[in-house]
Image (spheres, rainbow, N blue to C red):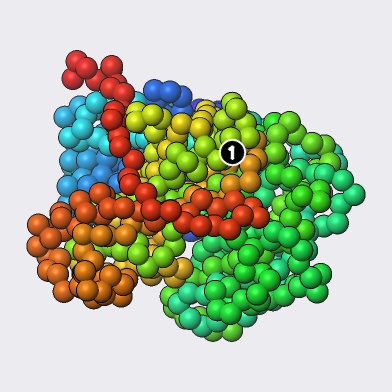
């Protein structure tokens, strides 16, 4: 196969760690997306997709066999894999599955189809296609929206036959989380009048502790008239990529003394009094995320008297190895333009309130926490716009126990398709994601963010909190047109477990810690009581005191069911 070395590459780089980036090889055709899977730059994956199928092309620095697959947990088994190699011009390629630490088994049904295979220099190239849903639930894995953990391996030698593969070794394998089915933004031209502003940590010495939240206040650029911010991207200090877990920028309502510009402090330990109210999310980025660009008709307003004049940059450093004397100047860059878009965008924070009443007991394989945004708060949010508001993107966030996050959507008791769903959430791979279609939110709607946690093997409770070892369950919804409501958060009260003599939160925690969480009945009862519990809810709006209310969980009359794949009806 002939390759034109001048073939113009047109990709969106996805989830590539800066200090280990290598130039990509030239693929056989123009692919919209690629990823470097390993740190040495020896394994590259290119792909494209449509509504029914996905096409992959692997470029691997080996003249032996190449393995590629999909695994829910990122481990080598159970997984849906293919293995191929080129021997004297003949391509060998088989669809397989793994069940343990032994050779992958050849599938009964060969559902991955080879399109091309060849050697070029030191590399083996394999191009293949498969259906997103092969209808083979026993030996294949369905490819869905959200995080997909791909696994890979390679070996320097060709096998002698289809079975009896030589083990690839620990250094020639790995896994990586990708959003395989995220829409690729079309090549948009940056407006010629674009400017940028950097929020960065100025040579901050990262403390030698497991987790640290560092905050810096910034005065936004002084602008003569309204501008729209339309893009942001992370600026990561080379060598510190594994320490910077997430970065948030919050706006500060009202007047902030100009002398606060550049003020630096530990975010949640005695912050300056006037900066405590800087709590509305403006920009969000987390580890694994790429640059984010808003659609052409939407921008985030800056520069008007009603817009924030000050922001606070929050950088969460995750330093489990307690590295010392690390200096960091990471941060975020925002791009803005005086050429206004049609709509102002807003961000709604919804989910479980960050509070110790979010409680995850030990020994659960799938514990569910729910954060409710009731119809009254949604009505306040949409009241200024009779046609409702439209969600364009979402950012889902949990911590280390999180296995999945879903933002559910109800209207008059009927559940609609989820606004966003990630069944295989990865703490180390988070970013804002554009919805495939804008989602209308009306005054009759209820939102519910659910997080799914695995605490099996733990001998302690995990509580809601700020540390990485605590938990969170949040969904940041970007929408338009902008309204004053900026957060709708709730937390269960657990009335069933509270003593009549002492109804305090501390008494509740002490009692729950006496229960036998290895007992499935205890676990099932706690999940049910949590689901049915009254909730304390806050609907937070600019310039209004956030008085909480006690609410019942929403009544779901008609749950949503996933559409059936008609192609599988005959299987």
Task: Depth check: give the residue in front, 480 or 231.
Answer: 480
Q: Residue at x 55, y 53 (%)?
A: 540
Residue depicted at x 31% and y 30%: 560
Is residue 147 shown above or below 397? above
CA neighbours of label 1 inside 10 A, class few (<14), some (14 to 19), many (20+): many
Decide if residue 558 is on the left or right side of residue 45. left
Q: Which of the 4 image quadrants contains residue 85?
A: top left
| Residue 489 relative to residue 544: left or right | left
Assign a secondary structure to mark 1. Answer: strand
Give x and y (percent) for residue 508: 26, 70
- Taking depth in this image into account, of 254 and 565 the one nearest to the observer is 254
Question: Is residue 252 rendered to the left or right of residue 434?
Answer: right
Residue 344 placed where, x, y %? 70, 39
Q: Where is mark 1, residue-wise?
A: 479
Q: Residue at 77%, 49% (x, y): give it.
A: 306
Above or below 359: residue 83: above
Q: Quadrant of the C terminus?
A: top left
Q: Where does the image place residue 442, in percent across and percent down from the top left?
A: 51, 30
């Amino acid at each position: 196969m002939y390759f034109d070395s001048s073939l113009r590459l047109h990709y969106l780089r996805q989830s590539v760690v800066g200090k280990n980036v290598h130039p990509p090889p030239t693929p056989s055709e123009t692919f919209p997306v690629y990823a470097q899977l390993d740190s040495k730059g020896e394994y590259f994956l290119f792909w494209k997709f449509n509504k029914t199928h996905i096409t992959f092309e692997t470029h691997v620095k080996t003249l032996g066999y190449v393995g590629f697959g999909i695994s829910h947990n990122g481990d080598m088994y159970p997984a849906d894999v293919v293995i191929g190699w080129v021997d004297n011009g003949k391509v060998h390629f088989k669809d397989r599955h793994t069940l343990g630490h032994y050779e992958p088994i050849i599938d009964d049904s060969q559902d991955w189809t080879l399109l091309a295979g060849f050697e070029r220099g030191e590399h083996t190239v394999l191009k293949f296609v498969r259906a997103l849903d092969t209808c083979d639930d026993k030996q294949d894995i369905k490819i869905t929206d959200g995080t997909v953990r791909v696994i890979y391996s390679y070996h320097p030698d060709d096998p002698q036959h289809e079975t009896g593969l030589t083990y690839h070794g620990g250094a020639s394998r790995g896994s990586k989380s990708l959003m395989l089915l995220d829409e690729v933004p079309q090549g948009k031209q940056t407006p010629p009048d674009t400017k940028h502003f950097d929020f960065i940590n100025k040579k901050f010495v990262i403390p030698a502790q497991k987790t640290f939240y560092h905050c810096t206040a910034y005065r936004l650029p002084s602008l003569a008239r309204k501008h729209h911010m339309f893009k942001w991207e992370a600026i990561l200090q080379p060598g510190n990529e594994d320490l910077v877990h997430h970065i948030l920028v919050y706006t500060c309502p009202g007047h902030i003394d100009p002398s606060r510009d550049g003020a630096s402090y530990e975010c949640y330990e005695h912050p300056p009094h006037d900066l405590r109210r800087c709590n509305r999310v403006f920009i969000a980025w987390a580890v694994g995320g790429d640059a984010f660009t808003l659609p052409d008709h939407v921008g985030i307003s800056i520069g008007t008297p009603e817009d924030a004049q000050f922001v606070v940059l929050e950088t969460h450093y995750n330093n489990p190895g307690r590295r010392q004397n690390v200096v960091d100047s990471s941060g975020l860059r925002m791009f803005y333009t005086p050429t206004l878009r049609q709509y102002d965008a807003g961000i709604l924070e919804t989910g479980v309130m960050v509070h110790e009443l979010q409680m995850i007991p030990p020994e659960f394989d799938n514990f569910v926490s729910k954060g409710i945004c009731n119809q009254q708060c949604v009505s306040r949010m949409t009241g200024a716009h009779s046609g409702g508001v439209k969600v364009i993107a979402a950012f889902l966030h949990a911590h280390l126990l999180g296995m999945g996050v879903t933002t559910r959507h109800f209207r008059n008791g009927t559940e609609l398709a989820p606004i966003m769903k990630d069944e295989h959430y990865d703490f180390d791979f988070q970013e804002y994601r554009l919805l495939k279609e804008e989602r209308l939110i009306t005054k009759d709607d209820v939102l519910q963010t659910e997080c799914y946690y695995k605490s099996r093997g733990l001998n302690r409770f995990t509580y809601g909190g700020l540390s990485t070892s605590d938990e969170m369950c949040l969904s940041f919804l970007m929408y338009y047109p902008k309204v004053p409501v900026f957060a709708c958060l709730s937390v269960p009260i657990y009335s069933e477990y509270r003593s009549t003599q002492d109804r305090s939160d501390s008494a509740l925690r002490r009692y729950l810690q006496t229960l036998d969480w290895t007992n499935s009945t205890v676990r099932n009862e706690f999940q049910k009581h949590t689901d049915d519990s009254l909730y304390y809810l806050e609907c937070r709006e600019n310039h209004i005191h956030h008085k909480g209310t006690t609410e019942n969980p929403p009544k779901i009359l008609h749950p949503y069911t996933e559409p059936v794949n008609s192609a599988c009806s005959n299987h």
